Image: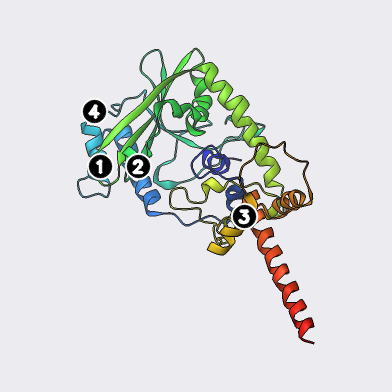
Amino acid sequence: QLSISQVESFDEEQPGGCPRRYWFERVHDLKPDQSKPQSDGEKGHALCGEYFATGAMPAKRVKMGKTVTAAILKGELPTPGPDLLSEVRFDGTFKPAHGAWVPMNEAETLHIAGVPFDGFIDLAYRRGAIPSILDLKFSADIDEYAKPVDKLIRTVQLPVYAKSQMPFYPDAKHWELGHHYIGRTAGHSFPRKVIVTTEQINHRVDVEITALVERMKVVAAMNVESEVPFNRRACHTWMGCPHQSICSAYRRNQVSFSDEEQALFQELEGPATQATPAAAGPDDAKVVQLCELTGCTPDEARAQLAKKAKLAAEADAARLAEAAKK
């Protein structure tokens, strides 16, 4: 089985997405502990779910109660009703009460690239011609982390949610996809929504996300860390990748050079010329080989090779000086 969060942890297009992170967490079960923002988000989801199901307002002293109440009173969240499907599972069932867990119906759930997907949608409903898919997002700084409207279709979550609901709304030609952002520490909240076509959702899921899942199958079968692709842009996303201490790609990325080493690198670069580039020589081949072996950048490889050459020259000079003394 797969989940949305697993695909997002793999997808380089998503914030923090890195195939090696997925490999550490899902293949080797090195999952990080739950963070406080994640814990607060769970509490906020529970309060919203209770409101959508029963119409009950959050208690004033309950953690996250004020922020959820503010979002409700602003009238930006849909009002409860029998057509409002809260915490609906991909297989068409609903999340059991009191944290109980039941097996997913694999025959009825969504499959992508032959893999069954499990997950629960915060809200799915249809009040008019267009079905709506809404996910609640809790963050301390929703203005900074809220996605632009045109990026909602580029998430993994929303198009997959909509795809899972297509059998229940077979006549739908358009879908409303949205995030509702609720500040964890203040009463600030707002929605971000976009209307997309069924064709857009099908292309995003059946072509692009399917290709991601096929890549995940390949990575899941890898046994050696050095074989697993990585995304250095994800190393410092959010609070930083939790696998920095064990990831060789991260450690290589932290290599720093002294002022002397930087000067050596500048000498290697030399002034720009208009001459026709020469064919790749031995030094170029060494750079390529070092990059392939260690995953470093060409600039890092040149600096390392320059340092090695300098040390070798100094060693030769020392040996010659020692020989002259004798």
Estimate the x, y position of residue 112 in percent, counting from the top left.
Answer: 62, 31
Q: Residues within 10 Å of mark 4 (few under 14, many from 20)?
A: few
Which of the two marks, 2 or 4, is nearer to us in this view?
A: 2
- Name which residue type carries label 1: Thr
Helix, strand or loop at mark 1:
helix
Work out whether mark 3 precedes mark 1 in sequence or the reverse, and give the earlier one: 1
Question: Which of the image's four quarters has the C terminus?
Answer: bottom right
Kindly report the distance in space between the C-alpha atoms of the residues bearing marks 2 and 1.
Answer: 10 Å
Work out whether mark 2 precedes mark 3 in sequence or the reverse, and give the earlier one: 2
Estimate the x, y position of residue 64 in percent, counting from the top left.
Answer: 27, 46
Q: Which residue lies under the disc numbered 3?
A: 267
Which of the two marks, 3 or 1, is nearer to us in this view?
A: 3
- Name which residue type carries label 2: Phe
Kindly report the distance in space between the C-alpha atoms of the residues bearing marks 2 and 4.
Answer: 17 Å
Q: Which residue lies under the disc numbered 2?
A: 138
CB under 8 Å between discs 4 and 3: no
Q: Which residue lies under the disc numbered 1?
A: 67
Estimate the x, y position of residue 129 in percent, counting from the top left.
Answer: 40, 12
Q: Residues within 10 Å of mark 1 (few under 14, many from 20)?
A: many
Estimate the x, y position of residue 271 in percent, counting from the top left.
Answer: 61, 46
Kindly report the distance in space between the C-alpha atoms of the residues bearing marks 4 and 3.
Answer: 64 Å
